[in-house]
């Protein structure tokens, strides 16, 4: 516990795939946050729309940033519209989370943060999820997601096209 910031830092001892140690040396992950992340990721894979609706906070925002500095802002409405569209077509958002590694967790007041790394189809991506915690200490909803990707040009174009057609 850092007395000046009242933040607890945690790290992995080998990631979720048994890989090399990552994260913050000498710190352990908050397993309650990691378990909640696993539940969230499983709901996404299963395209469980009701569960996903509950996982995303009403104030949810996702900022996607790429290597050139382009930024796209997405909301809960954007995410749920995408999930509904995919589900209506019988499609999913992925087949596995075997590539996921949880690197670090922090607690700060009524929020917690999970740093996650994955390499989907050979393309690395880094994520930071901010979770809300209830008064009884349960991790409830995803409040923020910061995604660092190679290129978000496609997403900027999709958002511009959606705005133009609205």
Image: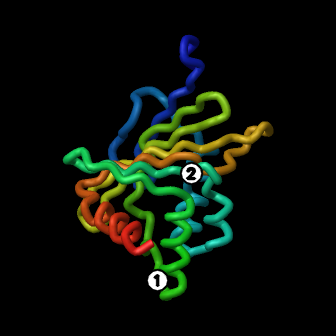
Residue at the bottom extreme, as displayed? 89
Gap between marks 2 and 1, in whole Å? 24 Å
Q: Using the image as rendered, state which of residue 116 and residue 144 is in the foreground.
A: 144
Q: Are marks 2 and 1 in contact (CB under 8 Å)?
A: no
Whether residue 40 can be seen here: yes
Residue in view at x 72 percent, y 44 percent: 138
Q: Position of residue 146 (x, y in %)?
A: 42, 46
Q: Position of residue 43 (x, y in %)?
A: 59, 67
Query: Which residue is the site of mark 2?
Result: 60
Pick the quarter of the image with the C terminus: bottom left
Q: Which class describes the residues within 10 Å of circle 1: few (<14), some (14-19), or many (20+)? A: few
Q: Position of residue 145 (x, y in %)?
A: 48, 48
Residue 108, above or below 149: above
Q: Position of residue 63 (x, y in %)?
A: 41, 49
Figure quadrant of residue 7: top right
Position of residue 45 in the picture relative to residue 21 (left or right): right
Whether residue 117 can be seen here: no
| Element type at mark 2 | strand
Residue at the right extreme, as displayed? 136
Query: Which residue is the site of mark 1?
Result: 91
Residue in view at x 53 percent, y 86 percent: 88
Q: Using the image as rendered, state which of residue 148 and residue 101 is in the foreground.
A: 148
The label shown at residue 49 is none
Residue in view at x 46 percent, y 56 percent: 74
């Amino acid at each position: 516990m850092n007395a000046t910031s009242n933040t607890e830092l945690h790290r992995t001892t080998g990631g979720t795939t048994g890989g090399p140690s990552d994260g913050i040396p000498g710190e352990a992950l908050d397993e309650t946050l990691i378990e909640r992340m696993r539940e969230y990721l499983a709901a996404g894979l299963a395209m469980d729309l009701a569960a996903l609706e509950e996982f995303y906070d009403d104030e949810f925002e996702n900022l996607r940033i790429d290597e050139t500095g382009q930024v796209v802002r997405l909301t809960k409405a954007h995410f749920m519209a995408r999930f509904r569209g995919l589900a209506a077509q019988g499609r999913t958002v992925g087949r596995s989370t075997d590539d996921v590694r949880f690197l670090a967790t922090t607690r700060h007041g009524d929020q917690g943060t999970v740093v996650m790394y994955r390499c989907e189809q050979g393309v690395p991506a880094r994520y930071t999820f901010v979770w809300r915690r209830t008064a009884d200490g349960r991790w409830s909803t995803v409040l923020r997601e910061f995604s660092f990707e190679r290129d978000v040009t496609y997403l900027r174009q999709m958002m511009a096209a959606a705005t133009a057609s609205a």
